[in-house]
Image (spheres, rainbow, N blue to C red):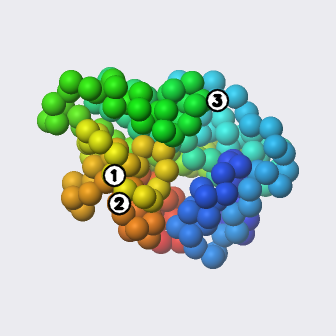
């Protein structure tokens, strides 16, 4: 499959920049914001369902092949929560509120029971009704810290301990995070599938 252009089903400029850097220059990534400001309702019950839903919507609106990312944090002790609701865990009040709610939920939980993983599912569709979306998943295993640390990243990065680097995800330089993260792992698989690896 040869794609010169893909539309990314996200209005997030940071995510566009991050994914374009991982994808390389062979494929131009365009924002869905060029075509519409309307976000589809994420009605799926899994990362896979929501990624496909967003990709199909972006392809329908733009007329181009579309790439969507659905990602979040799954905490073992919380049965996989916040999961697909990661971005709106604290009722849409933002990253600081999400982090505070997570720390409160794990208040008395010992370190050995604080395992977690960041999850990313990338879905690529050639057109809105593509019967065979390309799906690539990336997992990044770590644990939830007791206090926030670090100045980089976003979301739950300040609370996510990265064992292979002995620091939080927010302590990592962006270039390092882009090699280790759940999104980087999913994108490496996608690059292979597209013959770009």
Tag in front: 2 or 3: 2
Counting residues from the start of the chain, the first of labels 2 and 1 encountered is 1
Disc 2 versus disc 3: distance between alpha carbons? 31 Å
Counting residues from the start of the chain, the first of labels 3 and 1 encountered is 3
| Disc 2 to disc 1: CB gap under 8 Å | yes
- Please tell me which residue lies in front, 88 or 26: 88
From the image, tell me which residue sits under label 2. Answer: 171
Mark 3: which secondary structure? loop
Q: Quadrant of the N terminus?
A: bottom right
Which of the 4 image quadrants contains residue 181?
Answer: bottom left
Residue 149's disc is 1
From the image, tell me which residue sits under label 3. Answer: 42
Residue 74 image point, x, y percent: 37, 34
| Disc 2 to disc 3: CB gap under 8 Å | no
Which of the 4 image quadrants contains residue 111?
Answer: top left
Disc 2 versus disc 1: distance between alpha carbons? 7 Å
Q: Is residue 189 visible?
A: no
| Disc 3 to disc 1: CB gap under 8 Å | no
Residue 112 image point, x, y percent: 14, 35
Disc 3 versus disc 1: distance between alpha carbons? 31 Å
Q: Is residue 175 above or below residue 128?
A: below
Q: Is residue 134 visible?
A: yes
Residue 71 image point, x, y percent: 50, 42
Q: Residues within 10 Å of mark 3 (few under 14, many from 20)?
A: some
- Please tell me which residue lies in front, 110 or 131: 110
Q: Residue at x 62, y 38 (%)?
A: 52
Q: Residue at x 36, y 63 (%)?
A: 172
Mark 1: which secondary structure? loop
Counting residues from the start of the chain, the first of labels 2 and 3 encountered is 3
Residue 194's disc is none
């Amino acid at each position: 499959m040869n794609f010169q252009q893909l539309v990314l089903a996200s209005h997030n400029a940071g995510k566009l920049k991050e994914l374009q850097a991982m994808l390389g220059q062979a494929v131009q990534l365009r924002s869905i914001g060029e075509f519409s400001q309307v976000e589809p309702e994420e009605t799926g019950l899994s990362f896979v369902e929501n990624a496909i839903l967003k990709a199909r919507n972006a392809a329908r609106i733009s007329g181009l092949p579309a790439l969507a990312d659905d990602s979040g944090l799954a905490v073992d002790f919380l049965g996989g929560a916040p999961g697909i609701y990661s971005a709106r865990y604290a009722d849409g009040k933002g990253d600081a509120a999400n982090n505070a709610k997570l720390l409160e939920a794990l208040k008395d939980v010992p370190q050995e029971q604080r395992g977690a993983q960041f999850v990313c599912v990338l879905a690529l569709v050639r057109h809105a009704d593509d019967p065979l979306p390309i799906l690539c998943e990336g997992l990044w295993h770590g644990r939830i810290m007791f206090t926030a640390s670090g100045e980089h990243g976003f979301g739950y990065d300040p609370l996510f301990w990265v064992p292979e680097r002995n620091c939080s995800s927010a302590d990592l330089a962006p270039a390092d995070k882009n090699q280790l993260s759940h999104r980087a792992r999913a994108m490496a698989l996608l690059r292979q599938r597209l013959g770009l690896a």
